[in-house]
Amino acid sequence: MKTPGSEELTNLELNEMLATWIVSDPSPGLKVKIFSQAGIVSRDTRDFAFPILANAWKPWYRSLIHNIRDLIRLQKLPPLEVTSKPVEVGSIWGAYRAGRSRSSAVSALIHVAVLVLLLVFFQTPQGKNIAQRVTDIYYVLPYQSKIPAAEKAAGGGGVKALTPVSKGEAPKLAHRQFVPPTMAVPDPKLPVTPAITAPAPQIVAEQYGDPLSKLDLNSGGQGINGLGSGKGGGIGSRNDDGYGIGHGGGSGGGAYRIGGDVSAPILVSKVEPEYSEEARKAKYSGEVLLSIVVDAAGTPRDIHVIRPLGLGLDEKAIEAVRKWRFRPGLKRGRAVATQAQVIVNFRLL
Amino acid sequence: MTAEQAFDAHHKAIYRFVYRLLGRADLAEDVTQDCFLCILREPERWNPARGDIRTYLFSISRNLALKRYRDDHSDLQVDQEWASSVPDQGLDQEISATVAEVVGQLPDLQREVLILFEYEGFQLAEIAEIVKANVGVVKSRLHRARERLRRQLAPYRKVGAYENAGE
């Protein structure tokens, strides 16, 4: 017999202590849980499992007949007697959360892949055409000349006379103007031949004036300096030292630049440019910058490519723009030829 | 005997046994479930000639529990209230928790033998069948387990037991 306080317990003491460890019963739902799981197993276990389960199993044709009979005439069942208590179960969403990041990423990937496949394979021919149509955004920009100033279309001037400039001799062409051409040249101490700044062939005439004007009384025109209606020292209707209808010195009869009293031409009808086959295959896109002159009838002419795109798109752009029609630019209410730039945008949708 | 009768008769004992082995209520229920599903699905594996259904069930649950124990031994955490379901208050509850802890620290083979013997009242021969060892081995394991418990639980002996022991 062990004494009190000894290092070891007696058998009796140990048994008493061991007896204090009591374990509570399992949850009451355990039986339902187990047998409902076993109920779906196989027909081999049904007799062993549960008499109820044994009855529940029927050959397929009998359950089919039973279902059809139920469909036609529903049998009334006795009121259900609930013997079990509801068991609290965990949230099903919480269980899913564990693998959410990866599985949702995979799900999203699959969705996108299926969508892409559908778009690729079930595209109608019409849909393809739409996808390959081009948008053409055009701008009529103020003309930015790249030609040297001396080569520009020229402008004229005039003296303040009420009658238009009369026909006469074109002034001498010089690179630099000292004396603007006027009708009445005062008696100078050091005569300098009136000249306009333009590298053009000399026309010998007894009188200065507009070679194209009507045969009329001598007149310096309505302008301030020179001949004609402009302000500069030239002849004609512009404001500079040359002749003709442009600005600046020089000769030429080119299109007006937009701005000032020259309004921009307005696009009335346009034709969509086609995509060239090469560019379509190469899925090439970009823009072509064209320089055009819209003449007084509103028709584009003198179409030049300023910034090409290549792959045949430049030609297609020219081809399309040639079919465009404008309301011509106006200068004092009169249709005139105007310079413009057009950007044709090729973009695969 | 149908499976339902077997279940009604033994599932609580199985649950208690596994709970004491593993120390977790959810695992104990899982193992109990697996154990009964086992005989529901393959009833032919139990041969009535070979032994009692009770012994058979305990041997299945013992295997399942050991498997579970080895599978996730690393993250097997003992319930905080392992022994808190004891009805008595105060000292008894404390002793109960200590008993649970000390038994839990026994080597696996000693622990199962001790639990089967002390708590489920099996004979040594039945235990030998359940743990698949011969009776002598079972006996020595049980002896060693009790010896260790006697030593480790000595500081916690009850005052009443003290007096009884002192007479």
Image: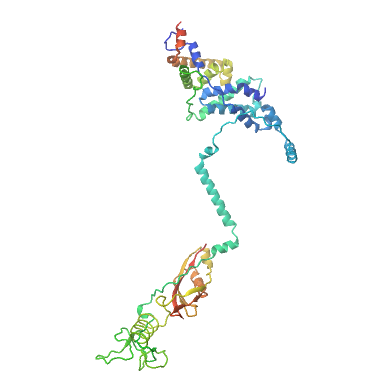
Q: Please state if B27 lies on the left or on the right of A263 as rendered.
A: right
Relative to B85, say whether A61 is above or below: below
Residue A42: % across, % down: 67, 33
Q: Position of residue B164 (x, y in %)?
A: 47, 8
Instruction: Reply above or below: A338 against B52.
Output: below
In the image as oriented, which residue stretches furthest toward the top? B167
A69 displayed left or right of B47: right
Please identify the residue farthest to the front as the structure is shown: A162
The one nearer the camera, B3 or B160, is: B160
Q: Quadrant of residue A61?
A: top right
- Tell me how the rendering is colored: rainbow
In this orientation, which residue lies closer to the viewer: A71 or A295? A71
Residue occupying image coordinates x 46% and y 67%: A287
Q: Nearer the viewer, residue B105 or A186?
A: A186
Residue B143 % position (x, y)? 50, 14
The location of residue B98, given as percent across then percent down, is 46, 19
Would residue B1 be found to the left or right of residue A304 on screen? right
Quarter-of-image position of residue A219:
bottom left
